[in-house]
Image (cartoon, rainbow, N blue to C red):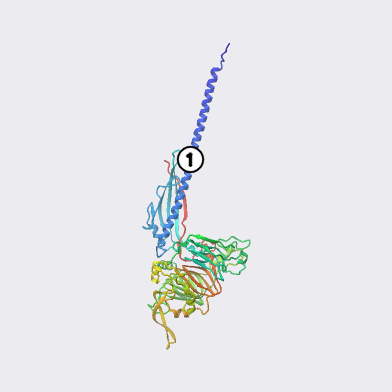
């Protein structure tokens, strides 16, 4: 007999309810999972958008910088170049022909990115460190896998400025092929060439060597040969307080950026560094007048901002007008800030103060040139911060010439015989010149012969028997290396023995040439062509106060030629997008 349970009608509803509960829970979990997947998708896509927006900004900053550099290289002056930033719209910036169009709805890693320009502010006219600040906004748009739109925007205020050129980070820099060879040659600092660099195994380099690829020279930037370098122990023991400090500054001392670390690295295939050619000196005249730069001696002001007066001949309109002789043999030359001399500068003796002398043509160093209060770096040094603070007020002289820097007495017959092979083709290759250098004989492409006539004149002197002195009588053709003042003036001013010390930062558009003795260069040497003939030995001590990353260079400003600094972000924010 089969019996029926009285509970059978109760079990089925319980099972059904249980299944419903499980279904609700499963549905909730599924919805939770789906919501999490959507949220994860949105979060991931937002992160991608944010990164794409930042990548777009970084790319645009670099391309704006390159466009600005390209424009700057076509101009004869530096301080008015920031007018380039005055022409802009939401989607472009820069003067016609050198403008940079910003990306618009461009695909980057699955996003569509647009960069817009919010506005530009510039430094006031005559600013010592001119700049332009631009507001850039990058907006990136993408969709998640579920089709949810995501937008992210980043805004930056970016500063473009001019600062002391990085070519001054080197003890020896040539904007050409580089040769660092010979017995008795030493550099305490890095060296660099905008071309191949040849080293000699008898040379000493307590620093690194850089060579750069250069399409103009058709070279790839090789470092050829080897050099010797000192260990930290031997470097510190050299008793040379004019060479840069070590890093660390003592055996258990402080790490010191741009100090000598006891190694010498050869670094080929670098990028070329922009050479900040001196163009129209009106920009530097404006700075000199704004700052109030002066040269004084024996209580007399020789230059107040700019010098355009008569030359050594005293003739009102002589060929040497605008030429200045500075002789610190008996009393130091007092320099304060930047000054501009229209024509040649003839200089020797002691210098006191800080500043730069800009010459509209050549600079002639006709004798030892030394600081009255030089910087010093004791080795080892357990208190380098105090040393840097003290050296901040020590003397520094910059000599910047639109033409050449000529060393020694070029009127001596042996001078030309020793130098000529290195200031004429084929050793010197032809090169394109700054258009403003046409006024001093460099028209278009210079053929490389510094011994040729430059198209200008120099004063000619004759001996007057009755007055027992030489008098200016006429003018004659001059060569690129000769002074407008005339050969007799150079012969009278030149030191009788060979030059043994030059304390200065040397810079020019063309060549540094001449004859010296066993000589110390304390500062930096920057030029296109170099033809220095030394006797026995030559040492280049780089002044670390010039270093762009050195602690000695912090808050130390000297009015040397400038180049565009890398763009710097001074404000950053992620913008909140409005809810749709």
- Extreme residue toward the front, this view: 426
- Left or right: residue 383 versus residue 28 is right
- Extreme residue toward the bottom, this view: 466
Image location of residue 379, percent across then percent down? 61, 66
Residue at (56% x, 14% y) in the render: 4
Would you identify the image quadrant in which residue 244 lies? bottom right
Res 357 seen here:
no
Residue at (42% x, 82% y) in the render: 461
Image quadrant occupied by the C terminus: top left
User: In this view of the protein, which residue sits in the foreground, 511 or 299?
Assistant: 511
Instruction: Say above or below: 373 vs 91.
Output: below
Would you identify the image quadrant in which residue 437 lies? bottom left
- Left or right: residue 265 versus residue 340 is right
User: In this view of the protein, which residue sits in the foreground, 173 or 388?
Assistant: 173
Instruction: Say above or below: 99 vs 474.
Output: above
Image location of residue 366, percent across then percent down? 49, 76
User: In this view of the protein, which residue sits in the foreground, 225 or 37?
Assistant: 225
Image location of residue 186, percent across then percent down? 56, 69
User: In this view of the protein, which residue sits in the foreground, 278 or 509?
Assistant: 509
Instruction: Say above or below: 542 vs 325.
Output: above
Residue at (44% x, 85% y) in the render: 469
Res 91 seen here:
yes
Q: Classify mark 1: residues with Cα within 10 Å, few (<14), some (14-19) or many (20+).
A: some
The residue labelled by disc 1 is: 41
- Left or right: residue 399 versus residue 256 is left
Image location of residue 104, percent across then percent down? 40, 49
Image quadrant occupied by the N terminus: top right
């Amino acid at each position: 007999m089969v019996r029926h349970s009285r509970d059978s009608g109760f079990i089925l509803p319980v099972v059904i309810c249980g299944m419903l509960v499980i279904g609700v829970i499963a549905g909730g979990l599924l919805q939770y999972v789906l919501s999490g997947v959507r949220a994860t998708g949105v979060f991931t896509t937002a992160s991608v958008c944010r990164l794409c927006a930042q990548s777009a900004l970084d790319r645009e900053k670099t391309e704006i910088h390159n466009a600005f550099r390209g424009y700057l290289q076509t101009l004869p002056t530096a301080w008015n170049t920031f007018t380039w930033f005055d022409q802009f719209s939401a989607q472009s910036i820069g003067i016609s022909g050198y403008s940079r169009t910003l990306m618009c709805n461009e695909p980057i890693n699955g996003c569509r990115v647009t960069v817009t320009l919010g506005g530009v502010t510039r430094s006031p006219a005559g600013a010592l460190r001119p700049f332009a600040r631009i507001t850039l906004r990058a907006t990136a748009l993408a969709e998640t896998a579920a089709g949810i739109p995501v937008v992210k925007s980043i805004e930056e205020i970016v500063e473009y400025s001019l600062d002391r050129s990085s070519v001054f980070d080197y003890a020896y820099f040539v904007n050409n092929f580089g040769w660092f060879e010979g017995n008795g040659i030493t550099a305490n600092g890095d060296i660099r060439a905008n071309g191949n660099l040849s080293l000699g195994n008898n040379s000493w380099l307590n620093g690194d060597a850089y060579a750069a690829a250069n399409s103009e020279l058709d070279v790839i930037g090789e470092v050829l040969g080897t050099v010797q370098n000192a260990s930290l122990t031997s470097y510190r023991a050299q008793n040379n307080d004019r060479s840069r400090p070590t890093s660390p500054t003592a055996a258990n001392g402080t790490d010191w950026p741009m100090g000598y670390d006891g190694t010498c690295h050869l670094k080929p295939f670098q990028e070329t560094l922009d050479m900040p050619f001196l163009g129209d000196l009106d920009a530097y005249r404006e700075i000199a007048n704004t700052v109030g730069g002066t040269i004084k001696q024996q209580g007399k002001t020789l230059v107040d901002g700019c010098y355009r007066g008569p030359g050594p001949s005293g003739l009102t309109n002589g060929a040497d007008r605008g030429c200045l002789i500075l002789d610190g043999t008996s009393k130091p030359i007092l320099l304060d800030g930047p000054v501009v001399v229209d024509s040649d500068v003839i200089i020797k003796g002691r210098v006191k103060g800080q500043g730069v002398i800009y010459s509209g043509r050549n600079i002639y160093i006709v004798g030892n040139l030394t600081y009255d209060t030089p910087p010093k770096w004791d080795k080892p040094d357990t208190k380098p911060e105090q040393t840097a603070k003290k050296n901040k007020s020590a003397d520094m002289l910059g000599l910047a010439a639109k033409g050449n820097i000529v060393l020694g007495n070029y009127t001596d017959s042996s001078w030309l015989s020793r130098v000529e092979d290195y200031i004429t083709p084929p050793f010197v290759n032809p090169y394109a010149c700054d258009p403003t250098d046409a006024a001093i004989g460099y028209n278009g492409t210079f053929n490389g012969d510094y011994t040729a006539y430059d198209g200008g004149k120099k004063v000619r002197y004759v001996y007057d028997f009755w007055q027992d002195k030489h008098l200016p009588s006429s003018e004659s053709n001059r060569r690129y290396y000769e002074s407008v003042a005339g050969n007799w003036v150079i012969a009278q001013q030149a030191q009788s023995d060979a030059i043994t010390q030059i304390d200065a930062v040397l810079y020019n558009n063309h060549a540094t040439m001449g004859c010296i003795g066993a000589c110390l260069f304390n500062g930096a040497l920057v030029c296109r062509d170099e033809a220095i003939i030394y006797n026995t030995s030559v040492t280049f001590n780089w002044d670390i106060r010039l270093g762009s990353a050195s602690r000695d260079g912090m808050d130390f400003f000297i009015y040397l030629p400038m180049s565009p600094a890398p763009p710097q972000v001074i404000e950053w924010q992620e913008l909140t997008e409005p809810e749709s």
